[in-house]
Image: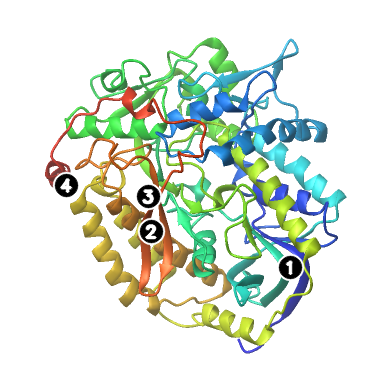
Amino acid sequence: MNKYDCTLQTDVLVIGGGFSGTWAAIKAREHVNNVLMVDKGPRDWGGLGSMSGGDMIVKQPEFEASDLVDELTYYYDGLCEQDVLKEILELSYDRFMDLEKMGHRFYREDGVLQSIPQRGLDKMRYYFYHPYGKGGSHTTEVLNKRLQELNVKRMGRVEITRLIKDGDRVVGAAGFHGQSGASILIHAKAVILAAHSGGWKGSYLLNTCAGEGSLLAYEAGATLRNMEFIENWNVPKLFAWEGQTGLLPHGARFLNGKGEDFMRRYSPKLGAKADPHYNVRGMAFEVLAGRGPIYFDTSTLSEKGIRDMTPTGGWMKLNDTKLKALGIDFFHQTTEWMSQVLTCFGGVKADKQGFTGVPGLYVAGRARSVTPGVYMGGWDSCLTATTGWIAGENAGLSAASQSETSFDESLALEALHEDTAPLGREGVSPKDIVRKMQRLMSPIDVCILKTQDGLARSLSRLEAFRDEVVPQAGASDPHYLVKLTEARGMTLITEAFLRASLLRKESRAGHYRADFPHRDDTRGPAWINVRKGEHGMEASFDAVPLDRYPVKPYRYYMDNFNFPVCASATVSEKQN
């Protein structure tokens, strides 16, 4: 590739066509005339949000944001960006009302808005769309309609491989079309990164997020945060199912091989009505103790729970129909479940305005990090709407006030040529890189009950593979060049996860070290930042600024659980 096939110019470029990118584009359009949104998937598909239930956590007017921030500080074991989360919560009700004005109505019974409290918290509640199963697709429909009304330009099948800078400032991006291979250069006054921070393709629902968002930010000089926190989920062994967040409060249970509600052993107060990471941890200890396999029991669901959670549309309805044809009635039997490594909870460090610290670059949605590995239903819908709005507002204002920037097309093309050099070259297949990263992440002493031995073992193997094998990769056509870009991103987030997990010698929130099972209260709560240094990836602590935060941590969600203390060598031995 020695010339580009397409060059574009816009005021604000949004990378990622999911809910966060859409909200960002809608808001940015208030300040500038030209907004361009690109996505590697089909145009207007709506990202992962299109396949969600459409549930949304909202601070309703009867609550105070400060009270919800207090709950989140507790839930996150002190790793809470209190100023950012207060801003998000304050904006959530307006975005909730925006959706309803667009025609997306949240469920009411007899005119009363219905909600489900999350994770044993009082005020963090999600509001849901009915009929169940259609919420994500309907949200996509109303948001796309709004994009069309605002004349936001959209392009699908575009894989961005590089953010282009003029000095320290991001002035655009370079990439290629995932079907034709045509190269694309985009000059922009401001860029919003709204691509998912990445994952390990653990489920067909999450096959698209692989790490390109983190890779773009990292190579542009941004700081990544919370990379040690990953989505360790519990899922049916033979199929996919959405909704345990709603099912557990309605009476569903996790059982061990002896039929025991085993999470009561580890948390008499909460049982399994907790973040899945605590349940996965309990599952791991049960299996290590010889009390597996693990089952999910829905026979104890309330009638209201069955009525509210039975899918009536979307992929979940299709799933339910196919399962019943096989004799599986999800709501009236137990099904075997397992743990699964899905996605990264880390992302780009940013301030209240969504600014990354790199001039010209803003971030939204799961591309930025506010969640230290513990999650609750409907939170992503809230975060994508509000952080998208915030990034769109500030990127739009920045672009509106920005004079013309210099975009050196020859230098951009040179960078793009480096990224696309594997096209048509024989070499290691992208799927082999993906499978290697999955194998490095899958041991129990790496992903769930982390140990020094397990993490160091995987890191050593990754370094050798990164240096010796990944550079030999090839892509037979543009589709596989997309897959190779994903594999490079996955390699980056795997390394960041391992390095940050090794540095955090304590257990807190979604991170559990079997060799350091307690919180390090001598240091106090601190994030881990990951940056590109002169000699490679660097990880360092960044203390939570409690001196300027109103909530001083005085209670910790992790203290609701009492997991057995076992030698880390025992975990590694049983793993091997």
Marked residue nearer the N-terminal end (3 or 2): 3
| Visible residue check, residue 48 | yes
Q: State the CA–CA distance, disc 3 to disc 2.
A: 7 Å
For image coordinates 46% across by 43% down, the residue present is 545
| Dot label at residue 421 | none
Q: Kindly identify which residue carries mark 1.
A: 189
- Check if mark 4's residue and mark 1's residue have beta carbons within 8 Å: no
Q: Nearer the viewer, residue 18 or 394?
A: 394
For image coordinates 38% across by 19% down, the residue present is 270
In the rendered image, the quadrant that contains the N terminus is bottom right
The image quarter in which residue 293 lies: top left
Element at badge 3? loop
Q: Kindly identify which residue carries mark 3.
A: 228
What amino acid is labelled 2 in the image?
Answer: Ala
Marked residue nearer the N-terminal end (4 or 2): 2
Q: State the CA–CA distance, disc 3 to disc 4.
A: 19 Å
Up/down of 466 relative to 156, above or below: below
Q: Nearer the viewer, residue 223 or 33?
A: 223
Up/down of 10 relative to 426, above or below: above
For image coordinates 49% across by 65% down, the residue present is 218
Q: State the CA–CA distance, disc 1 to disc 3.
A: 33 Å
Q: Kindly identify which residue carries mark 2.
A: 496
What amino acid is labelled 3 in the image?
Answer: Glu
- Check if mark 3's residue and mark 2's residue have beta carbons within 8 Å: no
Q: State the CA–CA distance, disc 4 to disc 2.
A: 21 Å
Q: State the CA–CA distance, disc 2 to disc 1.
A: 30 Å
Q: Is residue 197 left or right of residue 255?
A: right
Q: Nearer the viewer, mark 3 or mark 4?
A: 3
Q: Kindly identify which residue carries mark 4.
A: 572
